[in-house]
Amino acid sequence: MNEQKPIAVLKFGGTSVKSIGRIQHVAEIVQERSKCGPLLVVVSAMGDTTDYLVKLAKQASAKPDAREVDQLLAVGEQISITLLTMTLHSLGIKAKSLTAYQVGIFTESVHNKARIVDIKTDSLLSNLKNSDVLVVAGFQGITEAGDLTTLGRGGSDTTAVALAAAVNASCCDIYTDVDGIYSADPNLIEGAKLLKIVSHEEVLEMSRLGAQVIHPRAVELARQYNVKLRVRNTFKPENEGTLITGGPNMEIYRAVSGVAMDKEQSSVAIINVPDKPGIAATIMQTLAAENIVIDMIMQAFHPTIGKNSITFTVHQDDLDRTISSLNKIKAELGASEVLSDSDIAKVSLIGAGLAAQPGVAAKVFSILGQNHINIKMIATSEMKLTCVISKDDAQKAAQLIHDAFELQKAVSQ
Amino acid sequence: MNEQKPIAVLKFGGTSVKSIGRIQHVAEIVQERSKCGPLLVVVSAMGDTTDYLVKLAKQASAKPDAREVDQLLAVGEQISITLLTMTLHSLGIKAKSLTAYQVGIFTESVHNKARIVDIKTDSLLSNLKNSDVLVVAGFQGITEAGDLTTLGRGGSDTTAVALAAAVNASCCDIYTDVDGIYSADPNLIEGAKLLKIVSHEEVLEMSRLGAQVIHPRAVELARQYNVKLRVRNTFKPENEGTLITGGPNMEIYRAVSGVAMDKEQSSVAIINVPDKPGIAATIMQTLAAENIVIDMIMQAFHPTIGKNSITFTVHQDDLDRTISSLNKIKAELGASEVLSDSDIAKVSLIGAGLAAQPGVAAKVFSILGQNHINIKMIATSEMKLTCVISKDDAQKAAQLIHDAFELQKAVSQ
């Protein structure tokens, strides 16, 4: 077979395989790409399959067991891998479908959002002796005990990058339904511009904030293992999309590269916590034990009463669990109240050179102020400036910032 | 847990779990039964899931690969086991779903109709330490190489009996949508009567001929491992149904116990084969290699031309493959022609005491003759008399025979 040639990894998301017609189209891309060497093709579940399965689970039980949900959801990818493989066969391509168990994609023993621990390459490499294309189920994994797990949001992207890292693939191309990564969401922001090349770090800051082209876990993994990641459009396979590559290997320097928006967050505040060590740690440990990811943590000291308030944001889906977890430890913490605000959106400016330009933050605050947009929280990092504002203001704020920094003219390198 | 108490195996077919509402009903039966001890519950795919998946496969490829079809079909049971398990959880029952891989249901490496080779009991027994009910996927298996297989027709019944044999279960109850085993199909034959007890052998003769309550493979396995098998109605769980038990343990003696009908057969004739040894063997080996099951083989010698004709029946789904296989070896055999007839039905009379009563056959032939029903083929065995007639005559013939032997008065034990 093609063992001498390097292996490439391609990944197709749910919208790319949502019908037999689309699977046919994906098969043609795979056929074209397989002329250059062996392929591992990762697919997500077809279109709305996962939503449908989740609906079934909720009908069966108000609070379905996490292990059983994973065992149920894993069928989505098992369906799509077999249908794509059959379609490849009908094009005369030697292909074989493999589940997470058949590959040996081992995860930690956590359900619904497990992290990949190890990928065995024996099965992949031996199957490539008889097949030109292996179609691998994304999103799913297996524990040492043989239980099925799922990887949570962005799971299939993560599977693709992890496979690329495991077999030392020449590239990992994420085919999706957009052209690549833009300076802002082109559906929402006028003048949003496609970036031809971008650093892992910049994408991380963008995607964590809701520019939902590729999941940050996958980008992080790509950065860690130096995987050459590309985002491209399934429906315009001739386009090169956006290359996401390591910072040191390139010469990206843009003060501001994009604007991102995330309307799926809620903020939580724990009020009047005694000002003593260990309080924040207790809170974080409690939420970590529940697998709740929090962001934008800030602590404010009220000198008049000698107490602190701790505020942070969580994904809105985790809000109820967060509040009930905190209410359980409220007395232990000595806090007076747990408050939450669901009417928030994060609008962020991302740029590799942001930290070096103090004028940027001032400009953002002033634009928002002039337009009567109230800022609820602010957070800054080396590459990112985030303002939490009301959901209704988010789109307008993102457009104002995009315009003010003339991102529609962004150099696409 | 309940380790001291014997394990019971229950099996629910596709119609019993075809909706969340029905799964709820099944869960209530399981809840009731679990009061008496640990349970292994085998389920089929929900209602039309398998048909839907087969349709998808055919859309993906005109001739989908057998391995991929199995990998696809196996999801049907993976869905139903998780939904039943979640429903059991919501009733407060400690339950866990297990796929064939998780149990260790090993089959031969044949796709679409694999036979079970071995069932590991370690996983079952260790999981029963923490669960009162294990919900096991029927119909599916796994090869040593880790490929998924399916067991073909009657697969879930076979899984249930094989599990019962493996764990030495106290009983194996097959819940279906009929009350049990009748003297004839009650939907077709007036006066058909429910049998309270019947021997493995009688059921084998009946079910092989289309009394589709339970698959012969499952009954055969039950006979081999002396599994106490019962067929009962999911929708009337208070009824005892039909007990299928070993002949030696009981005192069944009925000249005639039932009439069965099978309209899904075709006959194939190989004409003018030279009268020399080895011909029949070549034919059978060729078809066996294709996994085609044949029945009612008969050979007729034509003394005038010194040649044989070989005739047999196959399931109509296998007819095309049978004819094309035979055409390939036609020249080698020296046969002049391969003919087929799809307008056939088998009507059979079954009874443990049949062979001892030569008058029975005469009575059957005379009834059919009086009613102008032409007999195309005849076969007899210890417990069965089968006439092949035209499909259109089948129902009438079965009713005539049922009436003639007064089976509506059959002693139910």
Image (tube, coloured by chain):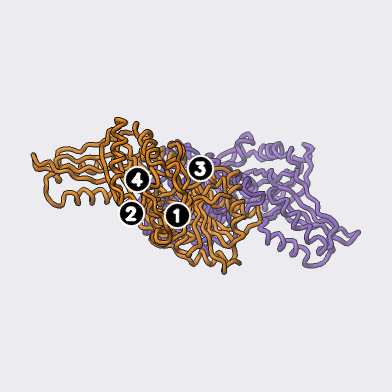
Chain colours: A purple, B orange
Q: Secondary structure at mark 4?
A: loop
- Closer to the camera, B110 or A229? B110
Quadrant in which the N terminus of chain A appears: bottom left
> Where in the figure is residue B311, as x and y percent of width and height?
22, 42
Image mark for residue B244: 1
Characterize the local packing of mark 2: few (<14), some (14-19) or many (20 or more) Cα atoms within 10 angstroms: some
Foreground label between 2 and 1: 1
Q: Secondary structure at mark 3?
A: loop
Circle 4 Cα neighbour tier, 10 Å, few/some/many (<14 / 14–19 / ≥20):
some
- Tell me the residue at 27%/51% (across/down): B289
| Dot 1: chain letter | B
Element type at marker 1?
strand
List the residue tagged with mark 3: B47
Instruction: Using the rendered image, report if marks 2 and 1 lie on a common chain.
Output: no
Q: Give me the disc on residue A385.
A: none
Real-space Cα distance between discs 4 and 3?
34 Å
**Which image quadrant for residue A296?**
bottom right
Q: Is residue A28 left or right of residue A209?
A: left
Camera-side residue of A239 and B38: B38
Tell me which amino acid carries mark 2. Asn
Q: Is residue A91 above or below residue A337?
A: above
Q: Position of residue A237 (x, y in %)?
A: 45, 39
Callouts 2 and 1 close, C-beta under 8 Å: no
Protein chain holding label 2: A
Q: Is residue A164 visible?
A: no
